[in-house]
Image: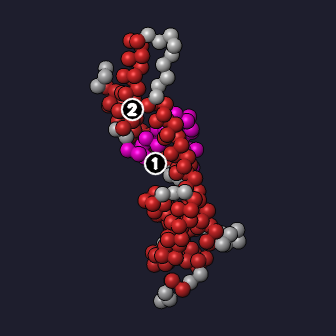
Amino acid sequence: MLDPAGESDEALLAKIASGDRSAFAAFFSRYAGRVKSYLLRLGARGSMAEDLAQDAMVAVWRRAASYDPAKAKASTWMFVIARNAWIDRLRREKVELAYRDYVEHPVASSDELPDQSAERIERVDKIRAALDLLSEEQRQVVQLSFFEDRPHSEIAERLKLPLGTVKSRLRLALMKLRAHWEQYK
């Protein structure tokens, strides 16, 4: 059996598409460090660059069958996946930061009475506590579904998840939130 480390990137991707772990290991060793360096140059910091590089490599494992050598070199395809992972992370953080700013800095109305203001602040604290109960994955799906009003199919495409996984995460999140709100009734 030939050593996969000496094969072309395209040949490795073809083998990865058929589930060859040794081909993936060779591709990983060839690109993981380069992808991390690329992400660092894009602005990702330390462990985030490493996480994103790992995510990109997992995406290669999952999507190797979709690679078309007629459209791009394997290295180009790899770096596009990494860049897209970085862009997706930036978008998620932007949404999360925007939501946190909204929750952490509620704007008081000029005609709001002190009691109303206190109730509003208490309600915001309860919302924050409820959202903190969710896993990061669940919170992300809830934010996209309810705060950005995205359809489930778009969320699945955006997060690169099966539609059933999105629905399952949303259902579990809503169950947790409902249980949390029951204590206030």
Residue to which mark 1 is pinned: 165
Label 1 or label 2, whichever lies nearer to me, is 2
Total marks placed:
2
Residue 178 is one of the magenta-drawn residues = no
Q: Earlier in the sequence, mark 1 or mark 2?
A: 2
Q: Quadrant of residue 43?
A: bottom right
Residue kind at label 2, given as amino acid type:
Arg
- Residue 156 at x, y = what percent? 53, 48
Q: Which mark is residue 128?
A: 2
For badge 1, the amino acid type reads Thr
Quick one: label 2, few (<14), some, or many (20+) residues within 10 Å?
some
Q: Is residue 8 visible?
A: yes
Can residue 18 be seen at all in this image of the molecule?
Answer: no
Q: Nearer the viewer, residue 125 or 137?
A: 125
**Mark 2 falls on what kind of element?**
helix
Left or right: 182 with respect to 100? left
Give x and y (percent) for residue 12.
Answer: 55, 77
Up-down: is 92 above or below 43?
A: above
Q: Residue at x 49, y 23 (%)?
A: 107
**What residue span does the magenta drawing correspond to?**
135-157
Q: State how far apart marks 1 and 2 are (Cα).
A: 24 Å
Residue at horizontal 54 percent and vertical 49 percent from the top: 90
In magenta segment, residue 153: yes
Hey, which residue is sitting farthest left in the picture? 183
Taking the spot 45% from the left edge, 60% from the top edge, the residue there is: 46
Q: Nearer the viewer, residue 15 or 148?
A: 148
Q: Percent position (x, y) of residue 58?
A: 48, 64
Q: Is residue 61 left or right of residue 67?
A: left
Q: Residue furthest right?
A: 70
Q: Which mark is residue 105?
A: none
